[in-house]
Image (cartoon, rainbow, N blue to C red):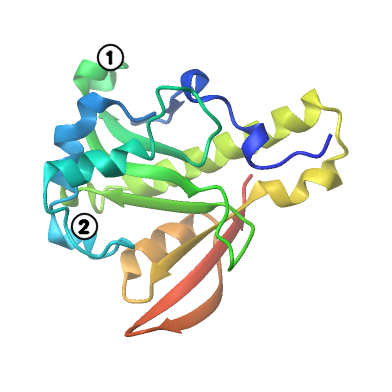
């Protein structure tokens, strides 16, 4: 069996949260709508996203969320999560505050690369506290675990799945903070490209 990014992922309904020292990184829920709309209407957050502008309505936020919630449990197109802060070290979702989003927004980034694409954004209140770095490192460990598990389950030689450990990301060159997060997490900037009126940096990492 040849493994692909899609067939190593758990189904939507069986996707477990990722726990780090201070955070719970969990699947999207419709109850997150209000918090995510608030996040996506902050100009200094959205300026760094592909969209580049704030959501104009809560319906626009809802439509965006639909990409990351699948109630039919069909084949995955992404592996994206909300990031919540564990207040008082509690695992109770009621005591966790939504502070961001992180995960694979797409399972490939063609035509640029067949590698899956990582994206993240955090509320300004969470900036400068190490939450983004903690989240990305936690996600990378989970991704490595999933690839290892799939490789062992299907008895596939390690060299045959080596590419699956790799993921990529794109940042605006002007987004110095985001570049700093990626560097702390072991990423390498491999290409700078000019696109219309902006400079983009392309990054990759082998998860470990």
Instruction: Give the residue at mark 2.
Output: 45
Query: Looking at this view, is 75 or 109 the one in front?
Result: 75
The mark nearer the N terminus, 2 or 1, is 2
Q: Residue at x 40, y 49 (%)?
A: 133
Give the crowd class for mark 1: few <14, some 14-19, many >=20 residues within 10 Å.
Answer: few
Q: Is residue 175 left or right of residue 157?
A: left
Q: Is residue 50 left or right of residue 97?
A: right
Residue 103: % across, % down: 44, 43
Is residue 87 visible in the rendered image? The answer is no
Q: Is residue 207 above or below residue 195?
A: above
Q: Is residue 120 above or below residue 33?
A: below
Question: Quadrant where the C terminus lies?
Answer: top right
Q: Are marks 2 and 1 in contact (CB under 8 Å)?
A: no
Q: Nearer the viewer, mark 2 or mark 1?
A: 2
Question: Quadrant where the N terminus lies?
Answer: top right
Q: Residue at x 71, y 28 (%)?
A: 149
Is residue 9 visible in the rendered image? The answer is yes
Query: Looking at this view, is 143 or 128 the one in front?
Result: 143
**Secondary structure state at the residue bearing disc 2:** helix
Residue 99: % across, % down: 24, 39
Query: Looking at this view, is 54 or 162 the one in front?
Result: 54
Residue 104: % across, % down: 48, 46
Location of residue 153 by image quarter: top right
Question: What's the distance in space between the residues labelled 2 and 1, CA to CA?
Answer: 27 Å
Instruction: Give the residue at mark 1.
Output: 92
**Secondary structure state at the residue bearing disc 1:** loop
Q: Is residue 168 left or right of residue 96?
A: right
Q: Is residue 70 left or right of residue 186?
A: left
Q: Is residue 203 above or below residue 120?
A: below
Residue 148: % across, % down: 72, 33
Q: Which mark is residue 203?
A: none
Location of residue 11 by image quarter: top right
């Amino acid at each position: 069996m040849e493994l692909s990014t899609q067939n190593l992922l758990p189904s939507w309904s069986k996707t477990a949260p990722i726990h780090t020292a201070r955070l719970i990184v969990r699947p999207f829920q419709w109850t997150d709508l209000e918090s995510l709309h608030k996040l996506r209407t902050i100009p200094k957050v959205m300026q760094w996203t592909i969209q580049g502008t704030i959501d104009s309505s809560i319906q626009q936020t809802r439509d965006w969320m639909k990409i990351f919630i699948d109630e039919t449990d069909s084949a995955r197109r992404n592996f994206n999560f909300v990031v919540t802060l564990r207040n008082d070290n509690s695992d109770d979702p009621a005591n966790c505050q939504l502070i961001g989003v992180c995960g694979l927004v797409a399972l490939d980034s063609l035509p640029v690369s067949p590698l899956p694409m990582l994206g993240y954004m955090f509320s300004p209140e969470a900036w400068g506290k190490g939450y983004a770095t903690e989240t990305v490192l936690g996600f990378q460990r989970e991704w490595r675990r999933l690839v290892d598990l799939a490789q062992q389950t299907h008895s596939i030689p390690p060299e045959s799945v080596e590419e699956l450990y790799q993921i990529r990301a794109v940042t605006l060159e002007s987004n110095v903070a985001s570049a700093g997060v990626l560097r702390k997490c072991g990423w390498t900037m491999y290409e700078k490209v000019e696109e219309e009126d902006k400079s983009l940096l392309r990054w990759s990492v082998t998860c470990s």
